[in-house]
Image (tube, rainbow, N blue to C red):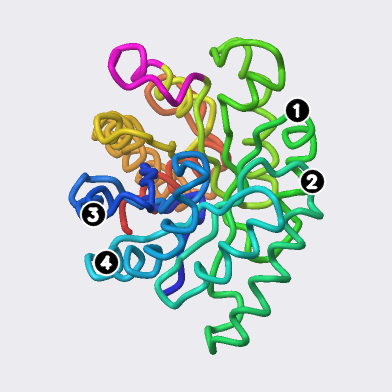
Amino acid sequence: MTFDMSPTCNYRSFLFVPTHKKSFWKKAYSRGSDTIILDLEDSVPVPEKVNARMQLVKALTHCKKHNKPTIVRINQSIRDAIHDLETAITNFTDAILVPKVRDSKHIETIDEIVTELEYERNIRAGNIKIIATLESAEGVLNSARIALSSPRMVALALGPEDLATDLGCAPTEYSLLGACQTIILGARAANLFAIGFPGSISEYQDKISYRKSIEKGRALGFSGAFCIHPDQIEIVNTVFSVTLSEIEWAKKVVSAQEDVADHHSGAFSLDGKMIDEPIIDRAKTILKSIEK
Protein backbone atom coordinates (compact mmCIF):
# COMPACT_ATOMS: atom_id res chain seq x y z
CA MET A 1 0.00 0.00 0.00
CA THR A 2 1.30 3.44 -0.93
CA PHE A 3 2.10 5.76 1.97
CA ASP A 4 -0.43 8.53 1.32
CA MET A 5 0.54 11.90 2.73
CA SER A 6 -1.48 14.14 0.48
CA PRO A 7 -2.72 17.39 2.12
CA THR A 8 -6.10 15.71 2.72
CA CYS A 9 -4.75 12.55 4.41
CA ASN A 10 -5.73 11.63 7.96
CA TYR A 11 -2.26 11.66 9.53
CA ARG A 12 -2.28 14.13 12.40
CA SER A 13 0.16 12.89 15.03
CA PHE A 14 3.72 11.62 14.54
CA LEU A 15 5.20 10.02 17.68
CA PHE A 16 8.98 9.86 18.08
CA VAL A 17 10.18 6.60 19.65
CA PRO A 18 13.86 6.01 20.54
CA THR A 19 14.71 2.83 18.68
CA HIS A 20 17.29 1.61 21.21
CA LYS A 21 14.54 1.29 23.85
CA LYS A 22 12.70 -1.93 23.10
CA SER A 23 10.11 -1.33 25.82
CA PHE A 24 9.15 1.92 24.08
CA TRP A 25 8.69 0.65 20.53
CA LYS A 26 6.98 -2.52 21.74
CA LYS A 27 4.01 -0.48 22.99
CA ALA A 28 4.24 2.51 20.65
CA TYR A 29 1.41 1.19 18.48
CA SER A 30 -1.00 1.42 21.45
CA ARG A 31 -0.31 5.07 22.24
CA GLY A 32 -2.89 6.44 19.79
CA SER A 33 -0.67 8.28 17.34
CA ASP A 34 -1.47 8.08 13.64
CA THR A 35 2.13 7.27 12.75
CA ILE A 36 5.28 6.12 14.53
CA ILE A 37 8.74 7.59 13.97
CA LEU A 38 11.46 5.13 14.92
CA ASP A 39 14.27 7.49 15.84
CA LEU A 40 17.96 6.91 15.21
CA GLU A 41 18.92 10.54 15.76
CA ASP A 42 18.49 12.96 18.69
CA SER A 43 16.74 10.65 21.17
CA VAL A 44 19.45 8.00 20.79
CA PRO A 45 22.74 8.66 22.68
CA VAL A 46 25.90 8.19 20.61
CA PRO A 47 26.95 5.03 22.51
CA GLU A 48 23.54 3.51 21.66
CA LYS A 49 23.54 4.26 17.91
CA VAL A 50 24.78 0.79 16.93
CA ASN A 51 22.29 -0.88 19.26
CA ALA A 52 19.46 1.21 17.79
CA ARG A 53 20.35 0.11 14.26
CA MET A 54 20.48 -3.50 15.41
CA GLN A 55 16.96 -3.25 16.82
CA LEU A 56 15.49 -1.27 13.93
CA VAL A 57 14.31 -4.12 11.71
CA LYS A 58 12.59 -5.84 14.65
CA ALA A 59 10.95 -2.54 15.58
CA LEU A 60 9.79 -1.94 12.00
CA THR A 61 8.37 -5.45 11.77
CA HIS A 62 6.57 -5.05 15.10
CA CYS A 63 5.00 -1.70 14.13
CA LYS A 64 3.84 -3.03 10.78
CA LYS A 65 2.38 -6.10 12.44
CA HIS A 66 0.05 -3.67 14.20
CA ASN A 67 -0.71 -1.78 10.95
CA LYS A 68 0.99 1.44 11.98
CA PRO A 69 2.49 3.66 9.28
CA THR A 70 6.16 3.74 10.24
CA ILE A 71 8.83 6.33 9.53
CA VAL A 72 12.55 6.14 10.33
CA ARG A 73 14.46 9.28 11.32
CA ILE A 74 18.07 8.94 10.25
CA ASN A 75 21.06 10.99 11.35
CA GLN A 76 22.17 14.17 9.64
CA SER A 77 25.70 13.45 8.47
CA ILE A 78 25.90 11.49 5.24
CA ARG A 79 28.37 9.07 6.81
CA ASP A 80 25.93 8.19 9.60
CA ALA A 81 22.94 8.40 7.26
CA ILE A 82 24.39 5.72 4.99
CA HIS A 83 24.75 3.33 7.95
CA ASP A 84 21.17 4.15 8.98
CA LEU A 85 19.74 3.66 5.51
CA GLU A 86 21.51 0.31 5.06
CA THR A 87 19.28 -0.93 7.87
CA ALA A 88 16.21 1.26 7.37
CA ILE A 89 15.35 0.45 3.76
CA THR A 90 12.92 -2.46 4.10
CA ASN A 91 9.47 -3.48 2.93
CA PHE A 92 8.16 -2.36 6.33
CA THR A 93 9.42 1.22 6.02
CA ASP A 94 6.98 3.85 4.79
CA ALA A 95 9.22 6.89 4.83
CA ILE A 96 12.58 8.31 5.84
CA LEU A 97 12.62 11.45 7.97
CA VAL A 98 15.71 13.49 7.11
CA PRO A 99 16.71 15.93 9.86
CA LYS A 100 18.36 19.35 9.60
CA VAL A 101 17.94 19.67 5.85
CA ARG A 102 19.61 22.82 4.55
CA ASP A 103 19.32 22.48 0.78
CA SER A 104 17.96 20.34 -2.02
CA LYS A 105 21.33 18.60 -2.57
CA HIS A 106 20.95 16.89 0.80
CA ILE A 107 17.64 15.33 -0.25
CA GLU A 108 18.97 14.44 -3.70
CA THR A 109 21.80 12.49 -2.09
CA ILE A 110 19.44 10.61 0.24
CA ASP A 111 17.14 9.87 -2.70
CA GLU A 112 20.03 8.38 -4.68
CA ILE A 113 21.03 6.09 -1.81
CA VAL A 114 17.45 4.97 -1.18
CA THR A 115 16.97 4.24 -4.90
CA GLU A 116 20.05 1.99 -4.96
CA LEU A 117 18.95 0.11 -1.86
CA GLU A 118 15.40 -0.36 -3.14
CA TYR A 119 16.78 -1.87 -6.34
CA GLU A 120 19.18 -4.17 -4.48
CA ARG A 121 16.41 -5.39 -2.17
CA ASN A 122 13.67 -5.81 -4.77
CA ILE A 123 11.53 -3.08 -3.22
CA ARG A 124 9.25 -1.29 -5.66
CA ALA A 125 11.03 1.81 -6.98
CA GLY A 126 9.88 4.95 -5.23
CA ASN A 127 7.92 3.05 -2.58
CA ILE A 128 9.77 4.63 0.35
CA LYS A 129 8.99 8.32 0.76
CA ILE A 130 10.99 11.21 2.21
CA ILE A 131 10.05 13.86 4.77
CA ALA A 132 12.43 16.80 5.24
CA THR A 133 12.75 18.59 8.59
CA LEU A 134 13.84 22.22 8.29
CA GLU A 135 15.75 23.31 11.38
CA SER A 136 17.88 26.27 10.28
CA ALA A 137 17.42 29.67 8.67
CA GLU A 138 19.07 28.31 5.51
CA GLY A 139 16.75 25.32 5.38
CA VAL A 140 13.61 27.42 5.83
CA LEU A 141 14.67 29.89 3.11
CA ASN A 142 15.28 26.93 0.76
CA SER A 143 11.97 25.23 1.60
CA ALA A 144 10.44 25.66 -1.87
CA ARG A 145 13.46 24.07 -3.58
CA ILE A 146 13.66 21.30 -1.01
CA ALA A 147 9.98 20.50 -1.55
CA LEU A 148 10.69 19.88 -5.24
CA SER A 149 14.03 18.09 -4.78
CA SER A 150 12.71 14.52 -5.14
CA PRO A 151 9.57 12.74 -6.34
CA ARG A 152 9.74 10.85 -3.04
CA MET A 153 9.04 14.02 -1.07
CA VAL A 154 5.71 13.92 0.77
CA ALA A 155 6.13 16.50 3.54
CA LEU A 156 8.07 19.42 4.95
CA ALA A 157 8.35 19.69 8.73
CA LEU A 158 9.41 22.42 11.11
CA GLY A 159 12.11 21.65 13.69
CA PRO A 160 11.35 24.41 16.21
CA GLU A 161 14.05 23.83 18.83
CA ASP A 162 17.03 23.75 16.46
CA LEU A 163 15.63 26.57 14.35
CA ALA A 164 15.18 28.79 17.40
CA THR A 165 18.77 28.04 18.42
CA ASP A 166 19.97 28.97 14.94
CA LEU A 167 17.99 32.21 15.15
CA GLY A 168 19.30 32.98 18.63
CA CYS A 169 15.93 33.02 20.37
CA ALA A 170 13.39 30.86 22.18
CA PRO A 171 10.86 28.81 20.15
CA THR A 172 7.75 30.98 20.51
CA GLU A 173 4.78 31.91 18.37
CA TYR A 174 6.40 35.22 17.45
CA SER A 175 9.90 33.97 16.69
CA LEU A 176 8.66 31.05 14.55
CA LEU A 177 5.71 32.66 12.76
CA GLY A 178 7.60 33.64 9.61
CA ALA A 179 9.29 30.24 9.37
CA CYS A 180 5.95 28.47 9.75
CA GLN A 181 4.40 30.46 6.94
CA THR A 182 7.41 29.93 4.66
CA ILE A 183 7.41 26.17 5.22
CA ILE A 184 3.65 25.91 4.68
CA LEU A 185 3.88 27.90 1.45
CA GLY A 186 6.78 25.75 0.21
CA ALA A 187 4.91 22.56 1.03
CA ARG A 188 1.56 23.58 -0.40
CA ALA A 189 3.09 24.94 -3.61
CA ALA A 190 4.52 21.45 -4.21
CA ASN A 191 1.31 19.75 -3.01
CA LEU A 192 3.05 18.35 0.04
CA PHE A 193 1.95 17.83 3.65
CA ALA A 194 3.08 20.40 6.26
CA ILE A 195 4.01 19.29 9.79
CA GLY A 196 4.55 21.68 12.67
CA PHE A 197 3.36 24.44 14.96
CA PRO A 198 4.78 27.70 16.34
CA GLY A 199 6.10 26.65 19.73
CA SER A 200 8.33 24.27 21.66
CA ILE A 201 7.92 20.56 20.97
CA SER A 202 9.41 19.81 24.39
CA GLU A 203 6.36 21.21 26.19
CA TYR A 204 4.17 18.34 27.37
CA GLN A 205 3.34 19.05 31.01
CA ASP A 206 1.59 22.39 30.46
CA LYS A 207 -1.20 21.00 28.31
CA ILE A 208 -3.09 24.30 28.06
CA SER A 209 -0.07 26.10 26.63
CA TYR A 210 0.73 23.19 24.35
CA ARG A 211 -2.82 23.02 23.00
CA LYS A 212 -2.76 26.74 22.20
CA SER A 213 0.42 26.23 20.17
CA ILE A 214 -1.12 23.32 18.27
CA GLU A 215 -4.28 25.34 17.57
CA LYS A 216 -2.15 28.15 16.16
CA GLY A 217 -0.36 25.62 13.98
CA ARG A 218 -3.62 24.40 12.49
CA ALA A 219 -4.84 27.96 12.02
CA LEU A 220 -1.68 28.76 10.05
CA GLY A 221 -2.19 25.80 7.71
CA PHE A 222 -0.22 22.89 9.16
CA SER A 223 -1.95 19.50 8.92
CA GLY A 224 -0.20 17.59 11.70
CA ALA A 225 2.50 17.76 14.36
CA PHE A 226 5.39 15.79 15.82
CA CYS A 227 4.99 14.41 19.35
CA ILE A 228 7.87 13.54 21.66
CA HIS A 229 5.64 12.31 24.51
CA PRO A 230 2.45 10.21 24.52
CA ASP A 231 0.66 12.93 26.53
CA GLN A 232 0.81 15.19 23.46
CA ILE A 233 -0.97 12.77 21.13
CA GLU A 234 -4.58 13.28 22.19
CA ILE A 235 -4.24 17.06 21.93
CA VAL A 236 -2.71 16.88 18.46
CA ASN A 237 -5.31 14.40 17.22
CA THR A 238 -8.17 16.49 18.56
CA VAL A 239 -6.97 19.83 17.23
CA PHE A 240 -6.10 18.51 13.78
CA SER A 241 -9.41 16.65 13.39
CA VAL A 242 -12.24 18.12 11.35
CA THR A 243 -14.97 19.31 13.71
CA LEU A 244 -18.69 18.57 13.36
CA SER A 245 -19.39 22.26 12.78
CA GLU A 246 -16.85 22.32 9.93
CA ILE A 247 -18.46 19.25 8.36
CA GLU A 248 -21.93 20.75 8.65
CA TRP A 249 -20.73 24.02 7.12
CA ALA A 250 -19.02 22.18 4.25
CA LYS A 251 -22.12 20.10 3.50
CA LYS A 252 -24.26 23.22 3.53
CA VAL A 253 -21.94 25.03 1.12
CA VAL A 254 -21.73 22.12 -1.33
CA SER A 255 -25.49 21.57 -1.22
CA ALA A 256 -26.16 25.24 -1.85
CA GLN A 257 -23.62 25.26 -4.68
CA GLU A 258 -25.37 22.34 -6.36
CA ASP A 259 -28.68 24.18 -6.13
CA VAL A 260 -27.39 27.37 -7.74
CA ALA A 261 -25.50 25.39 -10.39
CA ASP A 262 -28.85 24.31 -11.82
CA HIS A 263 -29.58 27.99 -12.39
CA HIS A 264 -26.19 28.63 -14.02
CA SER A 265 -25.19 30.97 -11.22
CA GLY A 266 -21.60 31.62 -10.09
CA ALA A 267 -21.04 33.22 -6.70
CA PHE A 268 -23.95 33.16 -4.29
CA SER A 269 -24.90 34.31 -0.80
CA LEU A 270 -25.20 31.90 2.13
CA ASP A 271 -25.98 32.97 5.69
CA GLY A 272 -25.01 36.53 4.90
CA LYS A 273 -21.65 35.62 3.35
CA MET A 274 -20.55 35.56 -0.29
CA ILE A 275 -19.60 32.06 -1.44
CA ASP A 276 -17.40 31.68 -4.50
CA GLU A 277 -15.13 29.02 -6.02
CA PRO A 278 -12.23 29.08 -3.48
CA ILE A 279 -14.67 28.69 -0.58
CA ILE A 280 -16.49 25.87 -2.38
CA ASP A 281 -13.16 24.12 -2.97
CA ARG A 282 -12.32 24.42 0.74
CA ALA A 283 -15.66 22.87 1.65
CA LYS A 284 -15.09 19.99 -0.77
CA THR A 285 -11.60 19.42 0.67
CA ILE A 286 -13.08 19.10 4.16
CA LEU A 287 -15.61 16.53 2.97
CA LYS A 288 -12.95 14.64 1.04
CA SER A 289 -10.77 14.40 4.16
CA ILE A 290 -13.48 12.54 6.13
CA GLU A 291 -14.01 10.00 3.35
CA LYS A 292 -10.63 8.35 4.03
Placement of 12 over or under 213, stated as above or below: below
- For disc 1, the neighbor class at 10 Å (few under 14, some 14 to 19, many from 20) is some
Label 3 vs label 1: CA separation? 34 Å
Queried whether the magenta region covers residue 202, the answer comes back as yes
Mark 2 belongs to which amino acid? Asp
Image disc number at residue 137: 1
Label 1 vs label 4: CA separation? 37 Å
Queried whether the magenta region covers residue 261, the answer comes back as no
- For disc 2, the neighbor class at 10 Å (few under 14, some 14 to 19, many from 20) is many
Residue range of the region highlighted in magenta in the rendering: 199-212
Q: Earlier in the sequence, mark 3 or mark 2?
A: 3
Tell whether 32 sits left or right of 106: left
Looking at the rendering, in which quadrant would you find the N terminus?
bottom left
- For disc 3, the neighbor class at 10 Å (few under 14, some 14 to 19, many from 20) is many
Which residue does the numbered mark 3 point to in the structure image?
A: 29
Q: Check if mark 1's residue and mark 2's residue have beta carbons within 8 Å.
A: no
Picture coordinates of residue 180 (x, y %)?
A: 61, 27
Q: Check if mark 4's residue and mark 2's residue have beta carbons within 8 Å.
A: no
Label 3 vs label 4: CA separation? 9 Å
Q: Residue at x 79, y 46 (%)?
A: 103
Tell whether 260 sits left or right of 104: left
Tell whether 87 sits left or right of 182: left
Q: Which of marks 3 and 4 is nearer the N terminus?
A: 3
Q: Which of marks 1 and 4 is nearer the N terminus?
A: 4
Nearer-the-camera pick, 203 or 44: 44
Q: Which residue is drawn at 22% across and 56% down?
A: 26
Nearer-the-camera pick, 74 or 68: 74
Q: Which is more foreground, mark 3 or mark 4?
A: 4
Which residue does the numbered mark 2 point to in the structure image?
A: 103
Which residue does the numbered mark 4 point to in the structure image?
A: 62
Q: Which of marks 4 and 2 is nearer the N terminus?
A: 4
Nearer-the-camera pick, 198 or 7: 198
